[in-house]
């Protein structure tokens, strides 16, 4: 099998789950187990590099999201400790907790959740505890997941990233999975040539190179690597830290544009 064919199969295998609806705890466990092997955790993104590249696409109704997921080092966390973690993170970003933290239990999984919807932002903070049987014993793993979704003011994401970085450090956590995503739309159906040209322009703005791209129906997906961003994942011998996706929505008659680093980890 040619290298290019092996690369295609490997990428599709790894990223196929990104477009399926799976429960939170499975996504967290699989994603974390994957990135802990291949993610280089040195520093976060700087100087709005990705935001600036996306702004230059001139898409409409821009939104951005930041997700940070990390495993808590302690095996045993009490209910009050889990709630204190959520309060600590909320305080770190200036978010007031004005109601009870929700507790959701489902067999081997328990979630402590606080979500708040503002006019132009949605914030979700979770502590997810998962029971795992090891031999005859039951062990617990605890994951902290923070998601911010911001409309319009996309360049404010870097400020929140720094605040969350400090909040996690305050919990004694340095190793984290961080995903940044931007999205917007073009009010028309773009031609294949237009999509490919826009993707090339985004990668050029980030001083990167395309590692792999493919078409699936009318959806165009690009994986690329840039040295401007320290984090990356590696598959089939290729480094990847940028994903671009473009897909046409027939109902709205708009082309959705996505830009993420290192890859999209939400349904699209």
Image: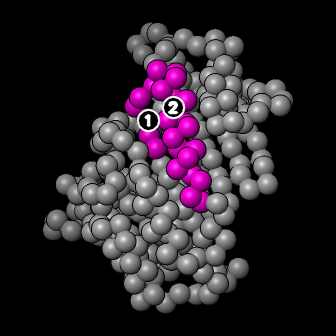
Which residue lies under the disc numbered 2?
166
Classify 10 Å Cα crowding around label 1: few (below 14), some (14-19), many (20 and above). Answer: many
Residue in the picture at 44% in, 40% down: 177
SS for dot 2: helix
First along the sequence among labels 2 and 1: 2
Q: Which residues are magenta?
A: 154-178
Q: Residue furthest right?
A: 99
The disc placed on residue 176 is 1
Q: Is residue 54 above or below residue 230?
A: below
Residue in the picture at 67% in, 29% down: 91
Residue 76 image-quadrant placement: top right
- In the image shown, does 266 or 82 lie closer to the viewer? 82
Task: Give residue 21's position: percent from left, percent from top.
Answer: 59, 52
One can see residue 83 in this view: yes
- Looking at the image, residue 131 sits to the left or right of residue 62; the answer is left
Task: Give residue 35's position: percent from left, percent from top.
Answer: 37, 41
One can see residue 214 in this view: no
- In the image shown, does 48 or 180 lie closer to the viewer? 48
- Looking at the image, residue 113 sits to the left or right of residue 133; the answer is right
Q: Locate the N terminus and report the quarter of the image it occupies.
A: bottom left
SS for dot 1: loop
Residue 264 counted in the magenta span: no
Classify 10 Å Cα crowding around label 2: few (below 14), some (14-19), many (20 and above). Answer: some
């Amino acid at each position: 099998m040619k290298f290019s064919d092996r690369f295609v199969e490997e990428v599709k295998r790894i990223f196929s789950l990104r477009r399926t609806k799976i429960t939170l705890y499975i996504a967290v466990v699989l994603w974390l187990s994957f990135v802990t092997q291949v993610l280089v955790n040195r520093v976060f993104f700087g100087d709005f590099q990705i935001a600036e590249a996306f702004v230059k696409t001139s898409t409409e109704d821009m939104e951005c999201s930041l997700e940070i997921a990390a495993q808590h080092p302690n095996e045993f966390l009490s209910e009050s400790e889990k709630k204190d973690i959520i309060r600590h993170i909320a305080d770190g970003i200036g978010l007031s907790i004005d109601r009870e933290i929700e507790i959701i239990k489902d067999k081997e999984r328990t979630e402590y959740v606080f979500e708040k919807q503002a006019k132009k932002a949605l914030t979700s903070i979770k502590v997810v505890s998962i029971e795992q049987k090891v031999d005859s014993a039951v062990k617990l793993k605890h994951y902290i997941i923070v998601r911010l979704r911001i409309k319009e003011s996309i360049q404010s994401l870097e400020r929140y990233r720094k605040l969350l970085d400090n909040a996690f450090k305050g919990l004694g956590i340095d190793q984290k999975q961080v995903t940044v995503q931007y999205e917007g739309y073009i009010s028309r159906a773009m031609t294949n040539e237009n999509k490919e040209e826009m993707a090339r322009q985004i990668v050029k703005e980030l001083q990167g190179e395309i590692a792999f791209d493919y078409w699936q129906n009318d959806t165009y997906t690009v994986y690329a690597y840039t040295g401007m961003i320290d984090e990356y994942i590696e598959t089939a011998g290729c480094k990847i830290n940028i994903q671009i996706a473009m897909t046409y929505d027939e109902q709205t008659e708009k082309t959705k544009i996505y830009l993420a680093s290192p890859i999209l980890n939400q349904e699209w």
